[in-house]
Image: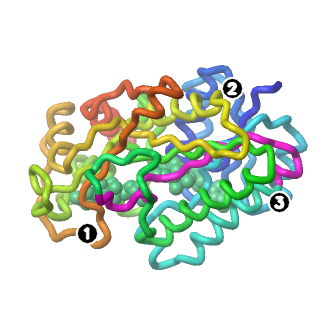
Amino acid sequence: MGNNILLTGGLGYIGSHTAVELILAGYEPIILDNLANSKVEVLDQIEKITQKKIPFFQGDVRDEEALQSIFSAHAIQGVIHFAALKSVGDSVLQPLSYFDVNVGGLTQLLKSMQKFRVEKLIFSSSCTVYGQPTDGWAVSESTPLQEPTSPYGRTKRMNEEMIHDICQTSRLSAVFLRYFNPVGAHPSGLIGELPLGVPANLVPFLTQTVAGKRDALTIFGNDYSTPDGTCIRDYIHVVDLAKAHVGALGFETIPHHPEIFNVGTGKGSSVLEVISAFERATGMKVPYEIGPKRQGDVMAVFANAQKISEKLQWNPQYSLEDMMEHAWNWEKNQN
Ligand code: NAD
Ligand code: UFG
């Protein structure tokens, strides 16, 4: 059995970190990316970190011929499907693009995998499928899912359901990784998140503010029913998240039964706690103000991460301070 793993969207934030960890674990990543939200230079950075050449195909996951050329040229053992559009706000404005890329992309990928008899798939899902949990703030893989609150969330739910259905009548072995909030960057400072325009997410907005690119961070609401009034999330270092994919690839699933793993630390942090962790880790002050609540925000959610710890022996290594320190190193390298 070969070690070739296709990473769709492999030049993106999570895909690039996963490519590095796959190489360290002895796999050979092959990347397909249409550069819709990444730059080809990321490939050089991955190669700099790993000292390995990585086959790269610039193309669209919806393009049958692009997939055909990869599956014909390389014996692919498994696929990690990152390629997607991921902005919640954008998805409300442009729902059709999200259905096209996220649902259409997975449909074409599954067709091509079936044709070339590639039977292992790791899918990038999201804790957004849980919505605001009604019975405590910690969610396990068996917590009932909520009605999606955005077209983006709906595509993730639909993607999970599509894969589930395909598994019923095929030999496809599938793992859904439900990511919580990935933040930070590679400790080398060579790869990280490349937000387009004004960042919608907390940590890139925070680091850009401290770097002087934004005036102040607005905290979206401080009168939630949480200990300090700000929202709670489970922030996970992107390198720890990347390592979970290595574990998932080695996992033997039960036939016709996609396996689901939450990937979070199991610890919730408030927005104010993130800001203090950043200040402790870097010695820099974060200018912030309190603004109104952001529409659609979940008040509090974090992972019950017991299953992934037990079944994949995966446990996060990095603290919230490490996440902030690495996010800041990365920000300082941008310009
Ligand atoms: P990203 O935008 O950095 O990476 C996605 C990559 O896919 C980009 O390089 C982009 O150019 C590429 N891509 C987009 N459309 C494509 C297409 N049609 N064909 C080929 N390539 C295409 O995003 P990310 O943060 O690395 O997220 C990766 C996956 O994880 C996505 O599926 C996302 O929905 C999911 N996810 C992300 C988060 C998060 O907060 N970052 C949370 C939960 C789930
Ligand atoms: N926040 C602020 N100010 C900002 C940005 C964010 O206070 O400028 C707060 C938000 O209100 C939230 C927390 O910081 O409480 C985290 O917000 P993010 O936008 O970074 O992350 P979300 O949890 O809202 O969203 C993320 C991904 C989505 C995904 C969702 C659930 O960005 O793609 O997790 O999986 F759908």
Residue 30, quarter of picture:
top right
Whether residue 201 is situated above or below residue 141 in the rendered picture: below
Is 195 situated left or right of 285 in this image? Answer: right
**Residues at circles 3 and 1 in contact by the CB criterion of under 8 Å:** no
How far is disc 3 from disc 1 in space, using C-alphas? Answer: 39 Å
Residue 126 visible to the viewer = yes
Q: Along the polypeptide, which appears first: circle 2 or circle 1?
A: 2
Answer above or below: position of 294 versus 208: below
Secondary structure under tag 1 reads loop
Q: Are marks 3 and 2 in contact (CB under 8 Å)?
A: no
Report the quarter where the N terminus lies.
top right
Type of amino acid under label 3: Glu
> Alpha-carbon distance for marks 3 and 2?
25 Å
Residue 34 in view, yes or no? no
Report the magenta residues as a range. Answer: 112-134
Where residue 232 appears, x then y in whole percent? 23, 51
Instruction: Tell me, yes or no, whether the highlighted magenta stretch contains residue 99.
Output: no
Mark 3 element type? helix
In the foreground, 288 or 100: 100
Mark earlier in primary sequence (3, 2)? 2
Residue at the image position 63 percent from the left and 46 percent from the top: 258
**Seen in the image, is 193 located left or right of residue 274?**
right
Given residues 302 and 306, the one toward you in this image is: 306
**What number is the disc on residue 64?**
3
- Asked whether residue 115 is drawn in magenta, I would say yes
Confirm if mark 1 falls within 8 A of ligand 2. Answer: yes
* Mark-to-mark CA distance, 2 and 1: 41 Å
Q: Earlier in the sequence, mark 3 or mark 1?
A: 3
Instruction: Count residues near mark 1 (Cα–Cα under 10 Å), then give few for <14, some for 14-19, many for 20+.
Output: few
Give the amino acid type for the residue marked by disc 1 in the picture. Answer: Arg
The residue wearing badge 2 is: 27
Residue matched to label 1: 294
